[in-house]
């Protein structure tokens, strides 16, 4: 789709000029080689080049550059190891304490603590972290690291990584932070745009009890208030056991979602307990005319601001000069084309088409678009939402009760008593303002935070989210506090932490005392995994295509972006979903709130589903807690290296498709 309104391309902040000519670079390298010998030549040439690429006029003239390189090159490996150890130690403390400051400044906005004051809105824009890397450059610390340690490309890691030891991996990962040199004002602009989008989404609640059908009836219980998209989706998924009444609710939620994506939702509807709304006709009451002006293109303006902010960093990342490339090649360490190929291998598989037919048979009706969230293969599909709510509220009536129960909960999952207590002591549970999230620590003396929605008491939905976030937190604790090198803390990319979150979330009923039963349950799990990956795969492609569209149309308005998102979502649907669902031009795949505030995050969910399916068998055949710890302590290797070490095989959709095929054949 082409943008309709021609306009000048928004100006990007120019990259500061470098004071270093090629001749000066060559001269500095020659002096070092002459002093230390030709055996050091490759390392010297690379290090000097890395410094020159990031040396600005403000850092000094050529003489200062040459003097720095000659004086700060470390030829002795033992001394270099000490240099790395000290850098790692210092960066952990700097990053860790600043992370804690940011968490405190954001606390009133992130947590359900009542109305946000004007001072708290301002405090969330205070970003001390934005200055850290530039301070490291100004103090020449970053240049010392660049001179003595290589900044590796993805290709180098893929080719050479299998031969590296843990020290080599840790040094390589430490240098990721110096791959770009982005000025503090640019980083602050990115933080402000994402924070604004986060708050917009966190406050996007729909009063379900105020929804009305054209005949004036309302099917939802009094007091039901759901956040978009998480709450709406989960409410829809929970109604498959209610027959005609549940179908009525699902169709109404579907209309709500379409209004949100198309930005047709009346502006007066969001989180207003006094307004009744008919999603089918888009009429509201009370209103003199029976109509309300739609919400302005606020949803897409936030997405546009996030795009513009991260794009402003492009001139400062010569190795990956677009945010899309940085997301895939630097963050995920998987090329965009490979991610798309993985997703398409699921979308185009015959197993998906066969599974869709099985779902239609189970439902006793043709599939409707919202059945992309069919939950009947999940164990909870046999139990009503109300029953599960009662069980959860009896066991975890408050967030504090969930916190107190963490050691026993972790033991029920398969962690030894001592390890369960060790983990629980490093996790703090908070009541989230939004849908919930996991916020890890950045230094080993700090604690991870589990945020879950608990408005009006803990429900099954909030417990299910809490189990998902607990998976993140357990990974975060082990991969920080239980790892050999701080520079390797974490997992290869966010898709891998999502994998552990999915595994924990899938065991929520076991924790509540409803263990899955027998081979039939295992077959259902395989089918549910495939259907969930099919759903999120399309959502991921929409996210990827939207970002490519924005880069192709950097002058687009919010209205033009809205039209593009709707068009892209329909195109993806028409290609991979309409042949199965029998309905065209559905924009449902664009409902995810991550599309607006998470900056090209959604592909991690698709990859995470694939990783989770490969990881899960290992967790089931071994002792769950021990296997989780073994895998998460591998650290931030490349996805390929991590998968081979964790499961003995590369990342692939093959196991998921094979298991689904076997499950389908067994139930013929």
Image: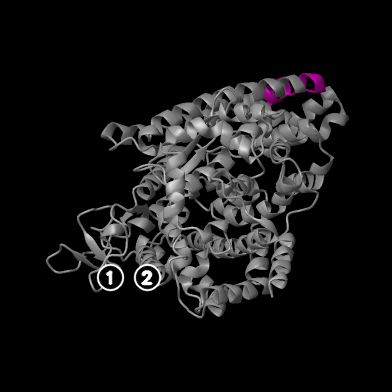
> Which stretch did the figure color magenta?
66-80
Q: Is 480 positioned to the left or the right of 564 in the image?
A: right
Of residue 136 and residue 601, the one placed in the foreground of this image is: 601
Q: Earlier in the sequence, mark 1 or mark 2?
A: 1
Q: Residues within 10 Å of mark 1 (few under 14, many from 20)?
A: some
Tell me if residue 475 can be seen.
Answer: no
Residue 350 placement: quadrant: bottom right
Q: Position of residue 339 (x, y in %)?
A: 65, 59
Of residue 399 and residue 184, the one placed in the foreground of this image is: 399
The residue depicted at 65 percent of the width and 29 percent of the height is 417
- Position of residue 52 relative to residue 276, above or below, is above
The residue depicted at 39 percent of the width and 38 percent of the height is 110
Q: Pointer 2: what residue?
A: 248
Q: Which mark is residue 343?
A: none
Q: Pointer 1: what residue?
A: 213
Q: Position of residue 558 (x, y in %)?
A: 36, 60
- Secondary structure under tag 2 reads helix
Q: Is 328 positioned to the left or the right of 392 in the image?
A: right
Is residue 74 part of the magenta span, yes or no?
yes
């Amino acid at each position: 789709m082409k943008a309709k309104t021609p306009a000048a391309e928004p100006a990007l902040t120019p990259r500061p000029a470098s004071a270093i000519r090629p001749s000066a670079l060559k001269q500095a390298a020659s002096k070092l080689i002459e002093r230390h010998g030709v055996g050091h030549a490759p390392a010297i040439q690379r290090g000097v080049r890395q410094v020159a690429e990031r040396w600005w006029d403000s850092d000094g003239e050529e003489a200062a550059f040459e003097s720095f390189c000659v004086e700060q090159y470390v030829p002795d490996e033992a001394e270099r190891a000490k240099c790395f150890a000290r850098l790692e130690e210092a960066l952990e403390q700097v990053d860790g304490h600043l992370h804690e400051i940011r968490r405190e400044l954001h606390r009133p906005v992130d947590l359900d603590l009542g109305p946000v004051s004007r001072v708290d809105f301002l405090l969330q824009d205070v970003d001390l972290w934005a200055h850290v890397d530039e301070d490291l450059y100004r103090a020449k610390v970053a240049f010392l690291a660049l001179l003595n340690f290589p900044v590796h490309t993805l290709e180098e890691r893929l080719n050479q990584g299998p031969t590296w030891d843990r020290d080599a991996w840790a040094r390589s990962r430490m240098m990721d932070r110096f791959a770009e040199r982005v000025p503090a004002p640019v980083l602050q602009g990115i933080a402000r745009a994402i924070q604004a989008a986060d708050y917009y989404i966190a406050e996007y609640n729909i009063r379900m009890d105020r929804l009305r059908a054209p005949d004036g009836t309302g099917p939802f219980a009094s007091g039901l208030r759901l956040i978009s998209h998480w709450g709406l989706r989960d409410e829809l998924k929970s109604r498959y056991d209610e027959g005609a009444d549940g179908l009525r609710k699902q169709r109404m939620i579907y209309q709500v979602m379409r209004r949100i994506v198309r930005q047709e939702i009346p502006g007066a509807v969001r989180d207003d307990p006094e307004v009744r709304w008919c999603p089918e006709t888009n009429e509201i009451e009370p209103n003199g005319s029976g109509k309300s002006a739609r919400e302005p293109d606020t949803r897409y303006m936030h997405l546009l601001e996030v795009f513009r902010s991260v794009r402003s960093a492009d001139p400062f990342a010569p190795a990956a000069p677009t945010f899309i490339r940085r997301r895939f090649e630097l963050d995920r360490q998987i090329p965009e084309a490979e991610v798309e190929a993985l997703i398409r291998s699921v979308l185009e598989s015959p197993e998906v088409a066969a599974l869709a037919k099985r779902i239609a048979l189970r439902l006793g009706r043709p599939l409707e678009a919202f059945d992309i969230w069919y939950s009947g293969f999940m164990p909870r599909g046999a139990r009503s939402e109300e029953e599960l709510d009662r069980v959860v509220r009896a066991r975890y009536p408050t967030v504090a009760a969930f916190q107190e129960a963490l050691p026993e909960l972790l033991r029920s999952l398969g962690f030894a008593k001592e390890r369960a207590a060790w983990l629980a002591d490093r996790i703090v549970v908070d009541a989230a303002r939004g849908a919930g999230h996991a916020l890890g620590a950045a230094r080993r003396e700090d604690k991870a935070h589990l945020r879950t929605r608990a408005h009006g008491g803990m429900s099954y939905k909030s417990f299910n989210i809490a189990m998902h976030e607990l998976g993140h937190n357990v990974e975060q604790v082990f991969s920080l506090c239980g790892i050999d090198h701080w520079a390797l803390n974490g997992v290869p990319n966010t898709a891998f932490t999502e994998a552990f979150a999915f595994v924990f979330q899938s065991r929520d009923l076991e924790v509540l005392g409803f263990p899955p039963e027998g081979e039939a349950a295992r077959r259902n799990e395989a089918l549910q995994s495939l259907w969930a990956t099919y759903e999120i795969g399309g959502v991921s492609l929409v996210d990827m295509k939207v970002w490519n569209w924005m880069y192709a149309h950097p002058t687009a308005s919010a209205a033009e972006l809205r039209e593009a998102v709707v068009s892209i979502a329909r195109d993806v649907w028409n290609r991979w979903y309409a042949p199965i669902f029998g309905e065209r031009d559905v924009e449902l795949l664009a409902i995810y709130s991550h599309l607006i505030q998470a900056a090209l995050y959604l592909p991690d969910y698709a990859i995470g589903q694939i990783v989770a399916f490969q990881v899960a068998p290992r967790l089931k055949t071994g002792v769950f807690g021990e296997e989780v710890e073994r895998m998460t302590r591998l650290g931030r290797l490349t996805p390929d290296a991590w998968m081979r070490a964790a499961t003995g095989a590369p990342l692939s959709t093959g196991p998921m498709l094979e298991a689904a095929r076997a499950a389908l054949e067994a139930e013929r």
